[in-house]
Image: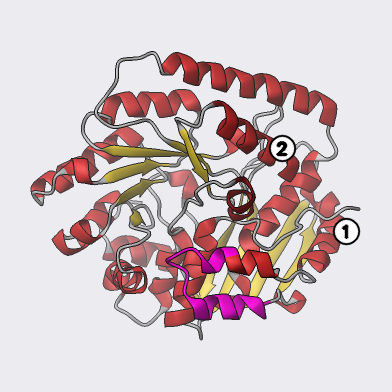
Amino acid sequence: MPPVIHSLLETDLYKFTMWQTMLHRHPQTQAEYSFVCRNRSEYPLAELLPQVNEQLDHLCSLSFQADELAYLRNLRFIKSDFVDFLRIFRFQREFIRASVDGETLHIVAQGPQVHVMAFEIHVLAIVNELYFQRFDAAAALRVGREKLAGKIDALHRFEQEPARRHPFEFFDFGVRRRYSGAWQREVVETMKREVPQFFKGTSNVLLAKELGLVPIGTMAHEYLQTYQALGVRLRDHQKAALEDWVQEYRGDLGVALTDVVGMDAFLADFDLYFAKLFDGLRHDSGDPVVWGEKALDHYAKLRIDPHTKRMVFSDGLDMERAFMLYRHFADRTQLGFGIGTSLSNDVGLTPLNIVMKLTHCNGQPVAKLSDSPGKTLCDDETFLAYLRQVFNVAS
């Protein structure tokens, strides 16, 4: 069957930014990532095992091409030695295995973190595309195009609303749960053509390169989780992660993710030093209005002008939810909206809620507590309880 992944550049930008930091600062770290489907699929994902293994074989045959490396080298925050590393990089098949247990599909990537961390987005794109190939493609694309046209109409109607202090800007964050690679490209091309005044970029680095868009992304949960197992005091792991990020990027990529142990615990560590150095914060769980008000209160307490900062929302957004948040906050701070599944997989079929998350580092469990109970991830209840106790987070 044809390959799902054609280029190693077809992944989220934040995989590269985290990858570079780990290569420079903690290259010896060992890690384990596990695939999980959080919702019920229309048919057992275990049926995909032979195709998944075939696609993983192909993925591990790919390498970065010269024009792709040149594109990365021209991003000012990507260091030349990291590009040199990518020039000789290939995924190692021995570091990833797929298996089944009854109807459940298991995929585990285990090995040196700098060799396994980039599997995540490719694996999710592979499983999604294989899964949706079994449905009626013509019907799905017909519905998808109707819904895409509706989104564009909604944006044009929204444009007629009274102007607010800061502009409405949204980005495509849809690689990981897209209907297909071809459909994501069609959506992004359409948004770029029809609503360039609102559509400002994509997390998909390949599409950013080929369509002349801004690649969007900074860090994900795995980055801060890794520091739970790097030998720093657990209570200090967020500050250690943020400090390394500041030292690595020196002012670039300044949006910090807040919900690895929850917003309250994050803000307790996000002191005046970090609040001045980072351009803003990203929301990915919990009530977005409550979260935003907490962020603005925090900046007010630190006497920081919120109009100089940005709040990026990325948790299960659709257009109407983004509009609601914009109306609520746009006169008080800069905003951005990362829209994923609602852009890249709104075709009349129930999307898979799949993730491939970091579960262990250096032989120790790591966890994401999140501000939404359903997003908590940890294989070790003892460590989870300890993490909650250390950060005073209720279970």
Q: How busy is the neighbourhood of tag 1: few (under 14 within 10 Å), some, or many (20 plus)? A: few
Q: Find the distance from the CA under tag 1 to the CA under tag 2.
A: 24 Å
Extreme residue in the bottom direction: 28
- Seen in the picture, residue 356 relative to 238 is either above or below; the reply is above
Residue bearing mark 1:
50
Residue 254 visible here: yes
Q: Quadrant of residue 294?
A: top left
- Asked if residue 6 lies left or right of residue 20, the reply is right
Residue at 27% across / 30% down in the picture?
Answer: 329
Q: Please state which of residues 266 and 309 is positioned toward the viewer in this rendering.
A: 309
Q: Position of residue 243 (x, y in %)?
A: 29, 71
Image depth: mark 1 or mark 2 in front: 2
SS at circle 2 = helix
**Are circles 1 and 2 on residues that touch, CB within 8 Å?**
no
Tell me if residue 388 is in the magenta stretch: no
Residue at 19% across / 58% down in the picture?
Answer: 276
Q: Which region is colored magenta?
A: 71-89
Tell me if residue 88 is in the magenta stretch: yes
Residue bearing mark 2:
183
Q: Position of residue 238 (x, y in %)?
A: 31, 66
Extreme residue in the right direction: 1
